[in-house]
Amino acid sequence: MSTFKAPKGTYDLTPPDSAKYLAVREAIAAPLKNSGYGYIETPGFENVELFSRGVGESTDIVTKEMYTLTTKGGDHLALRPEGTASVLRAALEANLHKAGNLPVKLWYSGSYYRYERPQKGRYRHFSQVGAEAIGTEDPALDAELIILADQAYRALGLRQFRILLNSLGDKECRPLYRDALQAFLRGLDLDEETARRIEINPLRVLDDKRAEVQKQLVGAPLLRDYLCDACKAYHEEVRALLTTAAVAYEDDEKLVRGLDYYTRTTFEFVHDGLGSQSAVGGGGRYDGLSEMIGGPALPSVGWALGVDRTVLALEAEGITLDIPSTTAVFAVPLGEEAKRVLFAVVTRLRRSGVAADLSYGSKGLKAAMKAANRSQARFALVAGERDLAEGLLQLKDMESGEQEPIALDSVVETLTSRLS
């Protein structure tokens, strides 16, 4: 009988590697928590319409990559392929925008699902940390989010990433650019599906990664030449704020991102050590998304950073995170009476805030000390019958190897003092 395996294109996170992913999530979340962003959690699936309207009918995500299902009750649902539409839906449903304190600042973390061709750095199930600032049009918010992501990456030790920046214009100036781009693209030799995309969302053609398409895009009209004065001024303010904060960025006139809802500021974090899957995160402003999904006008901006991709970026730079051991004290009982006593000691240590573990089963001293070593505990507590008869335990410093007797009735106080 064969054992079950994780579905193709997915992965399990198991210790000790999972500690790395947790540390990355915490590092990305830390600057957000420090900047007024509150945590939000949404379901793993939503109404299909939320994504087809919000993300866009013409995007690869909706046309090719979304996992959809029909429930027994006839509802059409989709596993969430991205986070922004879900978070905005939840904020609208909870009327957070009516609480009187705009922008509504939210951060989230979770798994997302896309039916893609699996390869390193591109999975069918992946993990992201995201942030959204909902309900205010202000270049300072766009700059703030880019700066917070930069801060998170630098706190992890990453240095070889770049920030690409562009403006996609707004409903005033983008139609003019769209017309010019369509006229240019219609003259190219493109396959049927790409030609169809020209009519639905021509900006997405610029995002086509195929060499034969990119070769033909040389000389395509640039969005920056069509920006209205308001969009130009807005973009200049974002750039100026980033420069003042000493955050380096590169202007990229072809950056469009893969979702239909972006307006004005759009940005991507890329890491050159990751090969073809170089984007570690990205985002932008999405001023019209709320209306697309049936809400009021709520100009907003946000990003999502890939946890899996960030871990790969750390590996590419050879960065080892300093992850503290999950165990500070490992108790080794020798005999049944010793186990009862040490179990009580471990329970008291845990209640005092000390990370403690115990050798379970009936291991001998040698096997139990191997387990203590593997736990990376700072101290081992060893108890045998003779020690207990004298009211003592043996305390071993796992770094120096030194061992000394300590009084059983003051063990918790002794250990909390030494570990502090």
Image (spheres, rainbow, N blue to C red):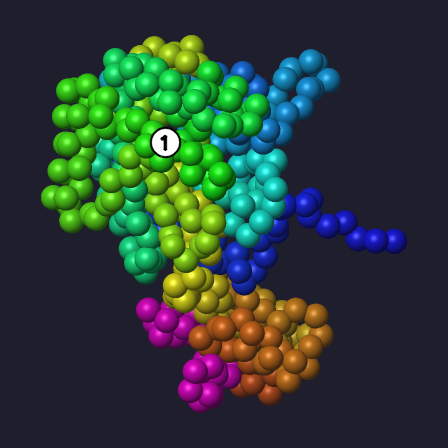
Q: Position of residue 158 (x, y in %)?
A: 33, 58
- Give the magenta range: 392-420
Query: Residue 231 is drawn in which quadrant?
Result: top left
Quadrant holding the C terminus = bottom left
Q: Which residue sits at x=65%, y=15%?
A: 75
Q: Residues within 10 Å of mark 1 (few under 14, many from 20)?
A: many
User: In the rendered view, does 74 fall on the left or right side of 355?
Assistant: right
Amino acid bearing label 1: Val
Query: Residue 382 is drawn in which quadrant?
Result: bottom right
Residue farthest right in this picture: 1
Q: Position of residue 339 (x, y in %)?
A: 63, 72
Element on which disc 1 rests = loop
- Comparing 174 with 297, the one in front is 174
User: In the rendered view, does 416 fall on the left or right side of 10?
Assistant: left
Q: Is residue 416 magenta?
A: yes
User: In the rendered view, does 402 fall on the left or right side of 126?
Assistant: left
Q: Which residue sits at x=39%, y=74%?
A: 414
- Does residue 299 appear in this view? no
Mark 1, residue position:
256
Q: Position of residue 11 (x, y in %)?
A: 61, 50
Q: Is residue 1 magenta?
A: no
Q: Looking at the image, is 415 positioned above or below residue 161? A: below
- Comparing 237 with 194, the one in front is 194
Q: Looking at the image, is 183 positioned above or below residue 109? A: above
